[in-house]
């Protein structure tokens, strides 16, 4: 099989090494297409080309290994427009773990989505909140949980209806995330939402994102249910929780659940109260621009586009100014999946209220006074981004400091391959 590989530079070696470990499969890398402009002509003897130079008649299949869901959506759109029919996309979780995406029969469909982009439709990532309230209240929280004054949980009937509707639009969603707030505050609801997500998307990477505080207190039945649903757990651990990390990891290991853990020391402010930013630049740079948000019958560009409504009253605005202005009504007539994907992939109004060339990082700390100070989320609007071309200060794509991230992957990840 002659493969055209679409990847980013940091993944070239991983992809080629994985293929070389399986000589019996007779897979031959024909070329590597970088979604950016290639910086050289050849890598390990394989031609490097631009994405626009791909021609379907030159190879048998396309392998996509891109760790950014926004880029993944952009690539899939381009491949669909050119009617590529034999496309394999390594999912984000095994990609992050540098897992072996091949087995004795070829592509391991527990780790890879196979698509015919003439007929199949695709979305890289969708996420929903199990609950909006949290037990940690981080300053600059991206979910604005410190502004949530009353308990708010997802409407399970609405979520079921929305996932059913979404399944009629997109045959494949690579990642389905359930988060918060803190989802383990509502463990039964988290399981119920996981069950619904798995019903409509049996092969997706299904993840529950948690700050880890409640992990050791979860009952064994909770982990058993997650394992039966082939759901994994992502734990983002902040300094206040660092001392509990050994117990958190011990609990996850004993539960036999697939997981990964990130230690985060810093948060950042990058939002503007008014839209002064360059929407195109911010859409391209933002690490959340491919993390689409499902809520109350709508699909939004990102969670910020909806959840910033919690902060709105603190700056004299109405919550609804944020919550539906960019969101797609999933129940509108004549929705086309590819048009929906194009809209989600392009810049939204909320992108004008981001300032990725001015991001200000600060050490993690909890909110200590209520109501919270919106200045802990918002940059000074007086310093506008006029003329922003993307040539300004380097924009950090990953706010996790070097060396702070580590991950553990159990030997056999139970996922549903649809067989």
Image: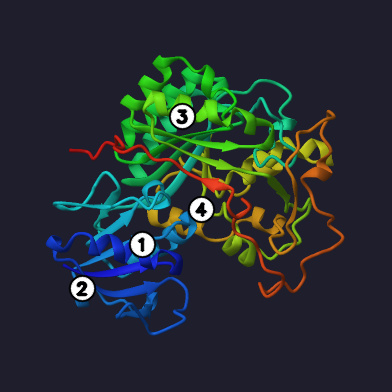
Asked whether residue 354 appears in the rendered view, the answer is: yes
In 3D space, how far apart are the residues under numbered discs 2 and 1 (Cα atoms)?
21 Å
In 3D space, how far apart are the residues under numbered discs 4 and 2 (Cα atoms)?
29 Å
Query: Residue 35 placed where, x, y %?
Result: 43, 71
Label 1 sits on residue? 14
Question: Observer-nearest residue: 216 or 222?
Answer: 216
Q: Residues within 10 Å of mark 2 (few under 14, many from 20)?
A: some
Among numbered discs 4 and 1, the one appearing first in the sequence: 1
Q: Residues within 10 Å of mark 4 (few under 14, many from 20)?
A: many
Label 4 sits on residue? 290
Label 2 sits on residue? 59
**Which label was assigned to residue 159?**
3
Viewer-side label of 4, 1: 1
Among numbered discs 4 and 3, the one appearing first in the sequence: 3
Query: Residue 55 placed where, x, y %?
Result: 27, 77
Query: Residue 23 placed where, x, y %?
Result: 16, 63
State whether residue 328 is above or below residue 50.
Answer: above
**Which label was assigned to residue 221?**
none
Viewer-side label of 4, 3: 4
Query: Residue 346 placed where, x, y %?
Result: 53, 61
Q: Quadrant of the C terminus?
A: top left
Q: How is the image coloured?
A: rainbow
| Residue 310 in which image quadrant | top right
Marks 1 and 3: CB-CB under 8 Å? no
Residue at horizontal 46%, vertical 61%?
Answer: 71
Give the tally of numbered discs: 4
Q: Is residue 105 left or right of residue 47?
A: left
Q: Is residue 277 left or right of residue 303?
A: right
In 3D space, how far apart are the residues under numbered discs 3 and 2 (Cα atoms)?
41 Å
Among numbered discs 1 and 3, the one appearing first in the sequence: 1
Q: Is residue 1 left or right of residue 287?
A: left
């Amino acid at each position: 099989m002659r493969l055209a590989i679409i990847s980013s530079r940091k993944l070239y070696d991983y992809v080629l090494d994985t293929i070389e470990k399986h000589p019996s499969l007779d897979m031959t890398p024909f070329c590597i297409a970088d979604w950016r402009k290639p910086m050289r002509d050849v890598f390990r003897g394989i031609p490097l080309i631009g994405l626009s130079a791909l021609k379907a008649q030159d190879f048998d299949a396309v392998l996509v290994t891109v760790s950014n869901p926004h880029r993944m959506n952009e690539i899939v759109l381009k491949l669909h427009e050119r009617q590529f029919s034999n496309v394999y996309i390594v999912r984000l979780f095994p990609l992050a773990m540098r897992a072996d995406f091949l087995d004795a029969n070829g592509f391991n469909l527990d780790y890879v989505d196979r698509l015919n982009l003439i007929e199949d439709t695709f979305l890289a990532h969708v996420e929903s909140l199990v609950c909006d309230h949290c037990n940690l209240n981080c300053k600059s929280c991206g979910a604005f949980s410190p502004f949530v004054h009353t308990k708010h949980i997802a409407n399970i009937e609405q979520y079921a209806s929305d996932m059913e509707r979404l399944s009629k639009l997109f045959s494949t969603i690579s990642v389905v995330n359930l988060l918060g707030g803190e989802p383990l505050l509502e463990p039964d609801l988290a399981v119920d939402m996981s069950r619904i997500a798995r019903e409509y998307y049996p092969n997706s990477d299904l993840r529950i994102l948690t700050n880890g505080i409640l992990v050791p207190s979860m009952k064994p039945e909770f982990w058993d249910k997650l394992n039966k649903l082939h759901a994994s757990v992502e734990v983002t651990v902040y300094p206040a929780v660092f001392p509990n990390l050994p117990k958190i990891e011990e609990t996850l290991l004993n539960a036999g659940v697939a997981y990964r853990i990130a230690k985060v020391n810093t948060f950042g402010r990058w939002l503007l109260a008014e839209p002064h930013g360059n929407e195109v630049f911010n859409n391209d740079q933002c690490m959340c621009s491919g993390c689409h948000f499902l809520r109350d019958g709508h699909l939004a560009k990102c969670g910020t586009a909806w959840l910033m409504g919690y902060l709105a009253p603190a700056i004299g605005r109405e919550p609804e100014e944020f919550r539906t202005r960019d969101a797609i009504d999933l129940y509108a007539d004549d929705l086309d999946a590819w048009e929906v994907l194009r809209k989600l992939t392009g810049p939204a109004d909320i992108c004008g209220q981001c300032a990725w060339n001015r991001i200000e990082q600060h050490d993690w700390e909890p909110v200590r006074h209520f109501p919270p100070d919106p200045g802990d989320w918002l940059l000074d609007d007086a310093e506008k981004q006029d003329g922003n071309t993307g040539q300004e200060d380097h924009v950090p794509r990953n706010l996790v400091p070097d060396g702070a991230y580590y991950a553990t992957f159990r030997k056999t990840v139970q996922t549903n391959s649809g067989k």
